[in-house]
């Protein structure tokens, strides 16, 4: 199987386009570019390794410490729908016999689910002042007998302990020698004690900032050591509740090893008000957070994909957020078979929409039984913005920038289709055809603006690129009620311009459904003309009607349905790129210079003079003289100067060269 994608997360950075050859559940080859006939072609978004959650106590009503086989199957399947393809089920402090029973349950489940990496035992060697939701009466002081008991537990992979308790360094060394990875947590340790534990073999730090000594400018404590000691992988709960988003941003900027975890409990994925027992205490899901009756936070209630989105919203780059939940946890746990996109790795993969919702998931090259939800369109109201009007102004502005960045990634993913449309349109214009735009509202106004700007920039007349705005030119300044629904007007306008099979028409509509635009495309295609579309919702009627559709999945707008925002921005850029690329193909530029610029005012005369002087390698007075002889035509002036010929001879050479200065000079 071959899966192609416009962007992939490889070694902590986005790269692409590329494709993956998958055989027997493994990635065998990374193919540069997009092959001609991939089995699965991803048109937008990002392909990443599957998510790895190293701290997960349960989800979807399932507590991993007591789960039945069927409950484990349910939780693992639901988590996979959210992109989590590997996890360490985590058991908090309990009586030793209960810990052994829980370990047996997890070991049995891991035989059916290769995504279960083993057992994360959080406790019982924790510091009493920082026990958090762990029952103090179940904590254990170190003894050789207790350690031997724990070492015999099947599937033990990770142990969280406090490095300052008596005997801790010896425990760390023995666990490390047994191949069990040690994390530091629920601790009041100093930075020095934390460093000593790292020297003894500790490798991770559990939920940094939570249930541990604080970060102080004269006493850095566990957080200071965790974020600066390159031997350690600091794990941070990514819900934005356990750790404030500003601190999350600081932490991920400080440590290239920082890992995103959920520390979720059985309340994750459950409705508000959900009640259950966890760790021997009653918990309730209140305001999206699982709490004990005394208000103590018992655990997070998110899945890791939601954690990714919250990290990005906090200002952490998408590639960093994704690496923190894939490549970094794999490195921390010394996993050699997963966590990266590379030959030999398990084909555990997640396809992300541009808003970083999960579009599809593969486990060892296979999709889960239940598909993930479809991407949300431009009309979708984002629930995470319910308090937008009450937020600080700077936060509102940053929210807009975050959304715009996501929209730009979606536009970048559409590059191959945009290039195909540009090539096809250029061929029509070279054969004497014209390029028409059709749109309503914001989309139509953007199209009109692009068409008008091409005249002075590329020296083309108004008959070359013709914008059709629903409601006519009046609609540019004032809304014309019902114009976008007037399908008949589209046909009438095309007919008035003698539109024919030689021409090309590009329809622009964020929704992909506007009747005026849809009718223009279907009528143009029926006449045999080239048709293209620029839309912002996937699987739309307009995209289906056009020969070449540019689908920019820019996602929900910050203000639901206001497509003058991200959708409009991406449409403007797409139109700029489309028309400019067509003009480049038509020889209207020479390198980065607009050599067909129409010098109709002082600014453009100065520009024409500079371009002529630069490309002809003469002084500006010499350039001005040649321009005067060439009737202010830059290409002709350059040929006069470079070839030492007359204006008439230069015009003839240009004509035989198809208007290309490069061909004329050669």
Image (cartoon, rainbow, N blue to C red):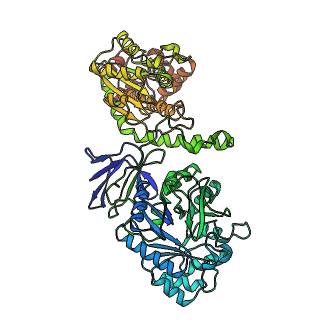
At horizontal 57% and vertical 45% (from top left) the residue drawn is 384
In which image quadrant can residue 336 be found? bottom left
78 and 35: which one is in front?
Answer: 78
- Whether 448 is drawn above or below 407: the answer is above
277 and 628: which one is in front?
Answer: 277
- Whether 355 is drawn above or below 641: the answer is below
At horizontal 48% and vertical 54% (from top left) the residue drawn is 305
Q: Position of residue 391 (x, y in %)?
A: 67, 43
- In the picture, measured across the screen, residue 250 lies left or right of residue 572, that is right
Q: Position of residue 474 (x, y in %)?
A: 52, 13
- Whether 666 is drawn above or below 646: the answer is below
Q: Position of residue 390 (x, y in %)?
A: 68, 41
At horizontal 50% and vertical 14% (from top left) the residue drawn is 473
Q: Position of residue 360 (x, y in %)?
A: 38, 50
10 and 487: which one is in front?
Answer: 487
- Name the outermost residue toward the right: 218
Asked whether residue 625 is in view, the answer is yes
- In the picture, measured across the screen, residue 443 lies left or right of residue 248, that is left
Asked whether residue 622 is in view, the answer is no
- In the picture, measured across the screen, residue 92 lies left or right of residue 593, that is right
């Amino acid at each position: 199987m071959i899966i192609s994608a416009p962007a992939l997360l490889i070694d902590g950075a986005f790269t692409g386009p590329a494709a993956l050859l998958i055989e027997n559940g493994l990635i065998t080859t990374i193919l540069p570019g997009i092959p001609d006939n991939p089995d699965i072609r991803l048109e937008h978004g990002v392909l990443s390794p599957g998510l790895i959650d190293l701290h997960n106590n349960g989800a979807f009503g399932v507590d991993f410490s007591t789960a039945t086989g069927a409950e484990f199957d349910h939780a693992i399947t639901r988590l996979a729908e959210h992109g989590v393809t590997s996890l360490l089920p985590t058991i908090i402090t309990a009586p030793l016999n209960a810990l052994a029973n829980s370990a047996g349950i997890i070991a049995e489940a891991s035989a059916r689910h290769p995504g279960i990496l083993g057992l994360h035992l959080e406790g019982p060697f924790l510091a009493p002042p920082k026990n958090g939701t762990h029952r103090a009466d179940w904590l254990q002081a170190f003894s050789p007998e207790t350690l031997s008991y724990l070492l015999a537990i099947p599937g033990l992979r990770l142990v969280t302990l406090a490095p300052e308790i008596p005997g801790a360094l010896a425990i760390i060394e023995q666990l490390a020698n047994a191949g069990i990875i040690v994390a530091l947590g629920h601790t009041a340790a100093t930075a020095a004690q934390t460093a000593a534990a790292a020297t003894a073999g500790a490798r991770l730090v559990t939920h940094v900032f939570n249930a541990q000594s604080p970060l102080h400018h004269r006493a850095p404590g566990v957080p200071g050591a965790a974020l600066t000691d390159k031997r350690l992988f600091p794990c941070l709960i990514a819900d934005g509740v356990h750790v404030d988003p500003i601190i999350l941003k600081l932490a991920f900027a400080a440590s290239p090893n920082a890992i995103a975890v959920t520390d979720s409990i059985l309340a994750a994925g459950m409705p508000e008000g959900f009640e259950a027992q966890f760790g021997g205490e009653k918990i309730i899901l209140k305001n999206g957070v699982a709490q004990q009756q005394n208000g103590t936070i018992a655990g997070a209630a998110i899945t890791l994909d939601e954690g990714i989105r919250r990290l990005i919203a906090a200002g952490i780059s998408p590639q960093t957020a994704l690496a923190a939940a894939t490549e970094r946890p794999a490195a921390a746990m010394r996993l050699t078979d997963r966590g990266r996109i590379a030959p030999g790795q398990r084909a555990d993969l997640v396809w992300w929409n541009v808003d970083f919702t999960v579009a599809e998931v593969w486990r060892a090259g296979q999709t889960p039984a239940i598909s993930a939800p479809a991407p949300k369109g431009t009309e979708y109201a984002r629930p995470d913005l319910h308090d937008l009007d009450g937020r600080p102004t700077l936060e509102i502005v940053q929210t807009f920038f975050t959304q715009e960045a996501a929209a730009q990634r979606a536009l970048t993913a559409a590059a191959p289709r945009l290039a195909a449309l540009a090539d096809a349109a250029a061929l029509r214009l070279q054969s004497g055809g014209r390029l028409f735009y059709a749109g309503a509202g914001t989309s139509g106004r953007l199209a009109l603006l692009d068409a008008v700007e091409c005249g002075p920039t590329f020296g083309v007349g108004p008959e070359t690129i013709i914008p059709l705005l629903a409601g006519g030119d009046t609609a540019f300044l004032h809304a014309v009620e019902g114009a976008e629904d007037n399908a008949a007007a589209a046909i009438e306008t095309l007919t008035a311009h003698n539109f024919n099979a030689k021409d090309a028409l590009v329809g622009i509509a964020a929704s992909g459904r506007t009747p005026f635009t849809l009718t223009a495309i279907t009528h143009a295609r029926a006449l045999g003309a080239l048709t293209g579309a620029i839309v912002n919702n996937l699987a739309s009627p307009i995209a289906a009607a056009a020969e070449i559709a540019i689908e920019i999945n820019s996602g929900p707008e910050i203000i639901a349905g206001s497509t003058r925002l991200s959708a409009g921005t991406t449409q403007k850029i797409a139109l700029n790129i489309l028309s400019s690329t067509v003009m480049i193909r038509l020889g209207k530029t020479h390198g980065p210079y607009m050599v067909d610029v129409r010098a109709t005012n002082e600014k453009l005369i100065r520009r024409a003079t500079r371009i002529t002087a630069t490309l002809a390698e003469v002084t500006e007075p010499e350039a001005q003289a040649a321009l005067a002889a060439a009737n202010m035509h830059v290409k002709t002036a350059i040929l006069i100067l470079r070839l030492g010929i007359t204006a008439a001879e230069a015009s003839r050479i240009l004509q035989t060269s198809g208007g290309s200065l490069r061909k004329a000079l050669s």
